[in-house]
Amino acid sequence: MVVHLGFFSIVLELDVLIELSLGVTYLPQLVLLVVWRKWLPQLAIFASAPSPSGSVSHTPINEPTPIDADIEAASISSDEEIAPAESPDPLKGKRSKVWLEFEIKKLGDGTSKAYCKHCKKSFDPSSKLGTTHLRNHLKACKIKKLSTSGQKLLCNSFSANEAPKLASWKYNPRTSRLDFARMVAKHDYPFLMAEHEYFRVFINGICPMFKWVSRTTVREDVMQLYNESRTELQDFFDKLPSKVSFTTDMWTPDYQNIGYCCVTCHYIDDEWVLRKKIIAYLTVPTPHSGVVLSEVIKAQALAWNVDRKLFAITVDNASNNNTKVDVVNELNEA
């Protein structure tokens, strides 16, 4: 009975020491390991004492246990001095998230400079200045605003049965400028629309980063889009295996003596769908005779590389259109 009381007293004393070691943060863990090593032989004696049933433990007292080996290894490793690893990271010790937006470089004279990763502007990275000047720069950095504005946008082009989607988006000033030119060309808006005061107020409220241009620049952008579309359509006609047909429309306004002609090209695509493209919208000099109109048709067929694919020309019943019929025969015989 005394043996068991002594065993419980030892365990109680160990519990107290463990609680003390855990409660005091500056107490080294090595003290706890030494205490455990001191009391392990006593615990082994109590473990080998006869039990009430008469059975005796045969574990040798002096044989080292795995716990002893672990304590020995811990004691040896705790005595060794661990040398800190050298790191060339210039941001070591700088805990502010501001430094993630800057790159520190050493100069030839031994000084260091912090360069903004967005605009490459340099700043003094010394700790005596803090990070306030760096934060102020990030708030005013225009390139950073362009790169981080609206990284994820909620897509609003979904039906009632679909859940909204997040789509990646980054503002591109060149794309927005060409989209504006496409709008002007598509809806026949005047080039001067780019200079309308309240239209600019409206767009600036939607996209403050939009960079405005003059009406002359809008006209140049529209002509650039036209030339690009013309080149794409010419390449398409070159690869088109089917024949094409022309329809023409000629008229003269009442208030001027200028003739206008619209030439439309009709063809069947690979899906056997009838398509049409306006390939010319031009003025025709006087006199509006059949010979002049025939030359207009021939010039457009050659310009679009469809002179060998021209199948038919549809015109109205004006007397000057009879000469146009001969154009098909001339081009097919050439």
Image (cartoon, rainbow, N blue to C red):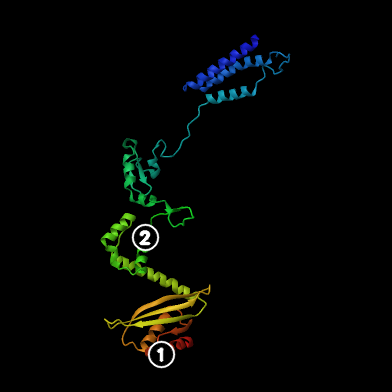
Towards the viewer: 194 or 188: 188
Q: Which mark is residue 322?
A: 1
From the top left corner, tell me how far across and down residue 328 is, in percent: 45, 86
Q: Given the image, on which type of amino acid does mark 2 rest?
A: Ser
Q: Secondary structure at mark 2?
A: helix
Q: Look at label 1 and name its amino acid.
A: Asn
Is the residue marked by circle 1 packed among few (<14), some (14-19), or many (20+) residues within 10 Å?
some
Along the line of sight, the residue nearer the viewer: 321 or 6: 321
The local crowd at label 2, few if under 14, some if 14 to 19, many if 20 or more residues have their Cα within 10 Å, is few
Which of the 4 image quadrants contains residue 125?
top left
Residue denoted by label 2: 176
Up/down of 167 relative to 91, above or below:
below
Q: Residue at x 39, y 44 (%)?
A: 101
Between marks 1 and 2, how big is the CA–CA gap? 48 Å
Quarter of the picture containing the N terminus is: top right
Q: Does residue 208 appear in this view? A: no
